[in-house]
Amino acid sequence: FFLSAKMFPCLLSAALLLTPSLSLDWGRARPLRTDPHRLSPVRVRVSPLRLQVADDPPDDGGGGEAEEGLPDAESEGIADFRAQLMRQMGGGGGGGGGGSADAPLSDRERLMRSVETAALADAPAPGRMLLANPAKFCSRNPFARPVKDLGRFGLDGPVSPDEMPPDLTAQMLPVLLLLEHGEGGSSAVLLERRTGALMGDIDIDSFGCVAIAPLWLGGTQRQNALSALHSVEGLEGAAPLRDGLWLGGWEAARPRVADSSLAAARFKFFLGATTWAAGQLEAEVAAGAWIVVEGSPELVLKERLDGSGARRAKPVWAEVLSALGEPGRTAYEAVYGSGD
């Protein structure tokens, strides 16, 4: 396949427009093992190249003119390349233009327009969320902290809201989605910790159709396990977590994502997990360390922007408490104050 010198900058521009910015550097590559309802073993190949998206992609005007200085055939090839990437991320969305009002919504549009809801839950269970209670996680008194090993959540010590901006405090307070909970213990994945890697860094053959999706850090334990969380019903090999959320089944989903009949935006991938021994999580919840929340799948899988200013998304912790409403007010105001 031949690329002219003029065509390469255009392809690179398309990749730049569609590649999310990264926030953290990823550490060591490890071989991944097979785990029930998780993915098959793959090799990690970390690419030295990192592309970042511009805050405001340039407007191409939506016209049908050829790229300046390129023959029509090459311009059409670039347009097809861009449309392919957009379909992969948007779930079958068409090419340019805004579309008619009667056009069916893509999976991404349905996800964005769905209602994000949250309610207090009475006890931990698979599919429920755990939000750190600042009254416990921000205490400098080690005897007042029911959670002793803060390093499991990527923390060097207690979170100090007096020493940092509210958004940064909220971003450091862990939010987890429970995958397993029972007599033998519990496991969950962190919802706001990036590895700094993309899925294409894992294995381009297995994850090429989601190559520019971020790889999230589920926790510092089970670091050779890779989990796929999604909202697709009926996938072979997937296990239900709760209504609207499933774990696993990527092998069955991959060809459908590759041909754009299923949106890549409906999947999130996590490396590692956070675990509790038998009875440990129940003791932490009873001591007030965690707020247990039943959150809608849309709230869990929401794609959050990495922009700045008005485009910058609120931390997951703050977003879930806002959706929770009055029951989450005390915790929210402990970080943001009563005037926010």
Image: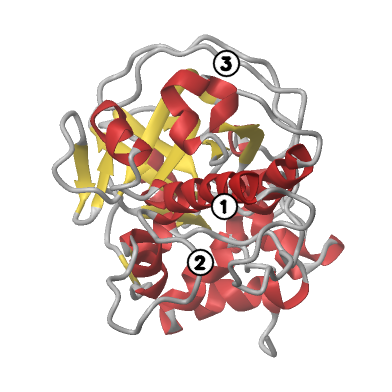
Disc number placed over residue 79 in the picture, else none: 1
Q: Which residue is mark 3?
A: 44
Q: SS for tag 2?
A: loop
Q: Position of residue 261 (x, y in %)?
A: 28, 48
Is 134 placed left or right of 98 in the picture?
A: right
Q: Which residue is mark 2?
A: 96
Q: Residue at x 34, y 14 (%)?
A: 34
Residue 274 in view in this figure: no
Contact check, label 2 and label 1, Cβ < 8 Å? yes
Is 145 placed left or right of 103 in the picture?
A: right
Q: Earlier in the sequence, mark 3 or mark 2?
A: 3
What whole-number distance in Å separates the C-alpha atoms at marks 3 and 2? 35 Å
Q: Residue at x 51, y 48 (%)?
A: 80
Of residue 235 and residue 127, the one placed in the foreground of this image is: 235
For the N terminus, the quadrant is top right
Q: Position of residue 132 (x, y in %)?
A: 54, 55
